Amino acid sequence: MKYSVNYQYRPKGRLRPVDNGQLVPIEITEATKVVLLPNIGDHVLIGATVDCEAVQGRVASRLFSYQEITDHEIFCHVNIVLDECDEGVWEQLSKV
C-alpha cells in the first residue's frame, strides 16, 4: 500500500488549518512493513525543505482517505492537522 501524509498547520483561534501543508510521501514495502504516524496529542516538528517552511504543532486530528487504484493496489492519503502550541512548549519537550 502506498501512503501520502499531509501535515497542515492551524494557528490558534482558527477553525480550519491554513491552505498549504507539507506533504510527506511514504511507501510500505516488505522491508519496512511499519509506518509510524503521530497520534492525537503528539507533538510534531518537520524541518524546512527547499519547497516548504518548517511545520510544528500538536496533532489535533488525523483523517485517513483510501482509494483503490487497481484491483490489487490501494492508496491511502492521511491528513494530519497540527495545532499551534503555546510559546515555550518546545523547550520543555527536549533538551538539546
Image: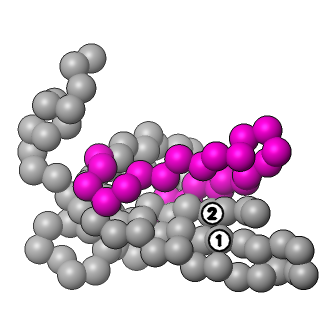
Which residue is identified by label 1?
76
Residue at horizontal 60%, vertical 71%? 77
Snapshot colouring: one colour
Residue at horizontal 36%, vertical 43%? 45
Query: Quick check: 45 above or below 41?
Result: above
Residue at horizontal 89%, vertical 74%? 72
Residue 89, x across and y down, in percent? 13, 40
The answer to whether 69 appears left or right of 88 in the picture is: right
**Residue 87, located in which quarter of the rendered image?**
top left
Magenta residues, start to end: 20-43
Query: Quick check: 95 above or below 44?
Result: above
Q: Kindly give the residue lying farthest to the top in the view shown.
A: 96
Amino acid type, mark 1: Cys
Locate the C terminus by quadrant.
Answer: top left
The answer to whether 34 appears left or right of 32 in the picture is: left
> Which of the numbered marks, if any, corresponds to residue 11?
none
Amino acid type, mark 2: Ser
* Local secondary structure at mark 1: strand
Residue 47, x across and y down, in percent? 44, 40
- Point out the tag, 1 or 2, that comes first from the N-terminus: 2
Residue 38, x across and y down, in percent? 41, 52
Which residue is identified by label 2?
4
Q: Are marks 1 and 2 in contact (CB under 8 Å)?
A: yes
* Local secondary structure at mark 2: strand
**Residue 32, located in which quarter of the rendered image?**
top right
Q: Is residue 28 visible?
A: yes
The answer to whether 65 appears left or right of 96 in the picture is: right
Residue at horizontal 35%, vertical 47%? 44
Query: Magenta stretch containing residue 42, yes or no?
Result: yes
